[in-house]
Image (cartoon, rainbow, N blue to C red):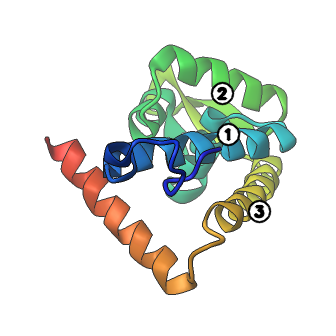
Amino acid sequence: METAADHRVPARLRAAPSWLLTQTATHAGRLVQEAFAAAGARRYHYALLAALAEFGAASQAVLGRRCGIDRSDVVAALNELAERGEVVRSPDPTDRRRNVITITPEGQRQLRRIDERLAAVQDTLLAPLAEDERQQLTGLLTRVLEHARRS
């Protein structure tokens, strides 16, 4: 991977935050995909398990909205998680047409395994930064993302 200081890359690109973000995101994406694969998971699995662990049982529709996942993709990912015993579906007591999804103890264990792998990815990705710089970068990226979502 070329670095921003690589003089084979035009200076205009090396100076453009959008270019730097894109290059970094591509690298980070590869690292994250490798971590998910090593844990036998995918991004949707992680997002759904994380939402269930943080917010509790929810309907498929609520999970999709919370995680930004299309309804058909939610169903497919939940089917995979259910087959592995990481979530259970139960009829919603207030509306029998809907299912309520709950994370299982195995789902909690899988979430911890993925969290450990993703923590290692963060350490690899952010190795050149001190802890305070990592926190500052996270804060700045959060502000940029929040602004983009309001636009």
Give the vertical position of 95 relative to 19 (above or below): above
Point 52% across, 14% down: residue = 72
Mark 1 highlights which residue? 30
Query: Which residue corresponds to mark 3?
Result: 116
Which of the marked residues, 3 or 2, is nearer the chain's N terminus? 2
Looking at the picture, how far across and down is residue 30, in whole percent? Answer: 67, 39
* 32 left or right of 92 in image: right
Label 3 sits on what residue type?
Answer: Glu
In the rendered image, the residue lying farthest to the left is 151
Of residues 89 and 74, which is closer to you in this image? 74
Instruction: Please tell me whether mark 2 or mark 1 is closer to you in this view.
Output: 1
Q: Quadrant of residue 141?
A: bottom left
Residue hosting label 2: 78
Find the distance from the CA under tag 2 to the CA under tag 1.
24 Å
Distance in Å between CA atoms under marks 3 and 2: 22 Å
Q: Quadrant of the C terminus?
A: top left
Q: Nearer the viewer, mark 3 or mark 2?
A: 3
Secondary structure at numbered mark 1: helix
Query: Residue 50 vs residue 32: left or right?
Result: left
* Number of on-image labels: 3
Q: Position of residue 125 (x, y in %)?
A: 64, 60
Distance in Å between CA atoms under marks 1 and 3: 17 Å
Mark 1 residue type? Arg
- Number of other residues with Cα within 10 Å of mark 1, as a class: few under 14, some 14 to 19, many 20 or more: few
Mark 3 secondary-structure assignment: helix
Contact between marks 3 and 2 (CB within 8 A): the answer is no
